[in-house]
Image (tube, rainbow, N blue to C red):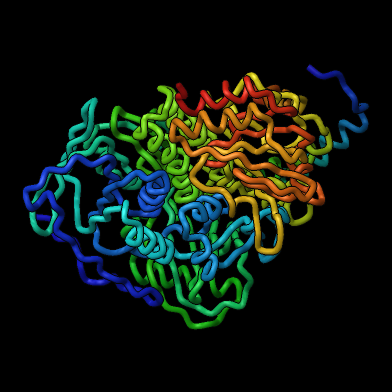
Amino acid sequence: MHFPDSSPRASLYYNYQIFPFRRPPELNGESVQHKVVIVGAGPVGLVTALDLARYGIPSVLVEADVQVSQGSRAIVFTRRSMEILQQVGVADRMMEKALPWRCGNSIYRGERVFRMEAPYDEDDRYQPMNNLQQQYLEEYLVDQAEAEPLVDLRWGTKVTAITNRADGVALTVDTPEGEYQLHSDWLVASDGARSAVRGMMGLRMEGDSYTGSFVIADIKIDIDLPTERLAFFDPDWNPGNTILMHKEPEGIWRLDYQLPVGETPEEALQPESLHKRIQAQLDMIGVTAEWEMDWCSVYSARAMTLPDYVNDRVLFTGDAAHMLPIFGVRGANTGWQDCHNMAWKLAFKIKGWAPDHLLPSYSQERVVAAWEIIDEASKSTRFMTPPDRGFRLLRDATLSLSLTQPFVRPLFHWRTSRAHDYVESVLNCNRDDNARCTAGPANGSPLQNIKLGENDYLFDHLGASIYLFYFSDQAELPQSLLLLKEAVARSGVPFEIVQICRQALQVTGHMLIQDADGHMHERYGAEEGTTYLIRPDQHVAARWKQQDNGDVLTALKQLISLA
Amino acid sequence: MSTSTLNINELEQVYDHLAKGITAAGNEKEALFLTKLALLLANQVGNGDQVVASIDEALKNL
């Protein structure tokens, strides 16, 4: 029997709620064939379930624990993440509490040697970075999932065995009321870096198992500093190492620091050691306030990925699919890009709308993204934690020069999670005008949000659908587009035409965006007749300077199977 | 590899000053000093490939 710890976790600021185990129909002898079982109700599993529900796909979400994340863990969420969370309905609630920010500072010998402002576009609804503890985020997602009839969230349910077959998956799960079998057409593994599903399937990751370890500590303290990233290099109290500080809501600050060479995680987590080091850091920056430890942990940096995220009927997503270096807020932020890429493809597969290449394209697009992330993160890692004497000398030389030589300061540039452009995707149309376009989002890239009015943005109007953006001032859609729309509607695939016009028009049967000042036309490099085909995850599939119906159909057939 | 661009007087001036610099930096800091110098000179050369070729050249016959 699986008895999860059902005493609420300790926290100085967060009230843990226990979600009781509920006896499922399987334990009463009922045999149920589920469409999708998702393992792991962390940020990625919860978003996957909510995302699938948007397409009418029910899922069973199993979680071994009976409460949300221990400690704050993921705290920095990017603009792209907020756009994805907006789609599943929790962004507003998050932004009521989160601390938005965009500036990072690198400090050496008491001087700020580099300051970077992440670009903020007036057309973006969300700031580049938003800090919130993972418990709150999970709480909001759990509330959303509990309110969604298509999500069957099963707490206290631990997967102990798995059989992956060509036509489905059989899972053995253990619960406080005993074991039962779960049968599903599809399984999504979102059970984190130590994925039990990955382990049980014997799948190996590729890449470097880099061994740097870091202490992550959350302390409750009143520090009168703005929400910005602070990176302290080579401080006297921890020579050669780097310390990061981030502000969180509820008067909490996150400190990260590398373990000195030869020290074990157990040694680093000794209360005396933690206290001495954190106090040394606070002393260095002249903070005299009292503080209290909320939570701490040790994180090992790795840069590895599964070579394929689709294994017959089992799909891997988030940290279960890859383990990424700590620098650059790449855990949850990458995981949501994974599952947002996967959800519509899996939904279309289940609905019978997917061409054969659609589901494999999830793995193709996101494995490429993982390698891009590993490459970018390794650049940050070799500066923050130099791997050998050569890199150490260059880093130290750069620190020393940075006090007087501005030319080295861009080496401090800190790379953070970004939205990936699926440039080489099989879903991209290659018979369109993409190569000839000089402005606007390119094929494979996420859409550029547009501020349409006060508290009104383009993404607010997008949902679980393929979209055709048609820039035109004509009162009537071309007959060919209307026929296309009817054909797609007959197939059942969600598909909407959005007309963007510079004049006041009255239209029926499709969405209209008034672009009186031509701003959206400009951002999208659009003229009369310009057309974009948009995937349900808001990435561009094809674009034409002037729409040509034959090509739109060709491009659409890359995304869906049409009779 | 490269042709001379410094005349003998300039070369001797650099020779002496660099020697004194290494000594002044001391055993512990000489590598850091030389690394800083290499970065400063690289920035002045303004040509990445040329600097990379010089790094490879300096690695020969050690």
The percent position of residue A25, horizontal first and vertical second, equals: 13, 52
Quadrant in the picture for residue A522: top right
Image check: A9 left or right of A181? right
Screen quadrant of the C terminus of chain A:
top left
Q: How many marks?
A: 0
Image check: A177 left or right of A155? left
Residue A455 drawn above or below residue A40: below
Residue A147 drawn above or below residue A398: below
Image point (41%, 34%), residue name: A348
Image point (57%, 23%), residue name: A553
Quadrant in the picture for residue A467: top right
- Closer to the camera, A112 or A190? A190
Q: Is residue A154 visible?
A: yes
The percent position of residue A212, horizontal first and vertical second, equals: 43, 47
- Closer to the camera, A279 or A505? A505
- Closer to the camera, A59 or A173? A59
The percent position of residue A3, horizontal first and vertical second, equals: 14, 60
Q: Is residue A398 visible?
A: no
Image check: A383 left or right of A47? right
Image point (76%, 37%), residue name: A526
Quadrant in the picture for residue A315: top left
Question: Which residue is situated farthest in the top direction here?
Answer: B1
Image point (48%, 73%), residue name: A252
Image check: A121 left or right of A339? right
